[in-house]
Image (tube, rainbow, N blue to C red):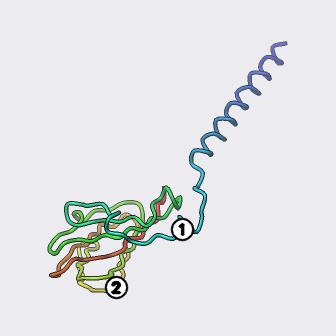
Amino acid sequence: MKTLTILKTTITVLFFQHTFSQETKKETAPPQYTIENCVNHFEIEKATKTKVGYQYWFADKDFTQENTLKMSIVEPGKSTHAPHHHVEEEFFYILEGTAEFYLDGNTKTAGPNTSFYCPSNMEHGIKNVGNTDLKYLVIKKDLR
C-alpha cells in the first residue's frame, strides 16, 4: 500500500511538472511570423529619443528569440555610453557619419559602409567624432 501511495504521489508531481513546463513554454513561444511583422521600415516618429539622439529597434530578442537589430542615431561629439563589455557578441555597421571605434584599449576612425565586430566580453564602444549625426546598425546575438 505504501508503494502505491508513493507511486501516485510521484505520478501527480510529474504531471504537475509537465503541465507547468508546458505552460512556461507557451509563455516563451516565438511570435507568429507574418510578412507584416517581418518587414520593418524605419520611421523617425516610432524611434525612441535618447540623451544623445535616437534608437530604433527593427527586431528585439523577444521577436527573434536570440538576435537584435537596432539603429542608433548619435549627435556629433557624443556616444551612447562609455566603453563596456557584455557576454553577447556584437556588430556595428556604419550607415552615415564618422565613428570612432574603441576595442580593448585601441581606437579606429571610420565612415559609412564599415563594420566593427565586438567579440564576447571585450571592452568596446563607439562615438560620433564627425560634424553630422552618426547613424549605425547594431546587431547582437543574445547568448543567454
Q: Is residue 4 left or right of residue 131?
A: right
Give, as a three-letter code, the residue at label 2. Thr
What residue would you read off at disc 1?
38
**Camera-nearest label, 1 or 2:** 1
x and y percentages locating residue 141 in the rendered image: 46, 65
Q: Vertical placement of 111 versus 68: above or below?
A: below
Residue 9: numbered disc: none
Q: What count of labels does the image hold? A: 2
Q: Is residue 71 left or right of residue 7?
A: left
Residue 114: numbered disc: 2
For marks 1 and 2, give the CA distance. 25 Å
Q: What secondary structure is found at the residue carrying circle 2?
A: loop
Q: What secondary structure is found at the residue carrying circle 1?
A: helix
Number of residues whose C-alpha sits closer than 10 Å to that of mark 2, classed few (under 14), some (14–19) or many (20 or more): some
Label located before the other in sequence (1 or 2): 1
Q: Quadrant of residue 98?
A: bottom left
Q: Is residue 138 left or right of residue 109?
A: right
Number of residues whose C-alpha sits closer than 10 Å to that of mark 1, classed few (under 14), some (14–19) or many (20 or more): few
x and y percentages locating residue 114 in the rendered image: 34, 85
Give, as a three-letter code, the residue at label 1. Cys
Q: Quadrant of residue 104?
A: bottom left
Task: Judge by depth and name the residue closer to the eye, 3 or 36.
Answer: 36
Identify the residue at image location x=57%, y=44%: 27
x and y percentages locating residue 137 in the rendered image: 36, 74
x and y percentages locating residue 79 in the rendered image: 21, 68
Task: Judge by depth and name the residue closer to the eye, 26 or 143.
Answer: 26
Residue farthest toward the top in the current orientation of the protein: 1
Task: Judge by depth and name the residue closer to the eye, 22 or 10.
Answer: 22
Q: Vertical placement of 17 versus 37: above or below?
A: above
Identify the residue at image location x=20%, y=60%: 51
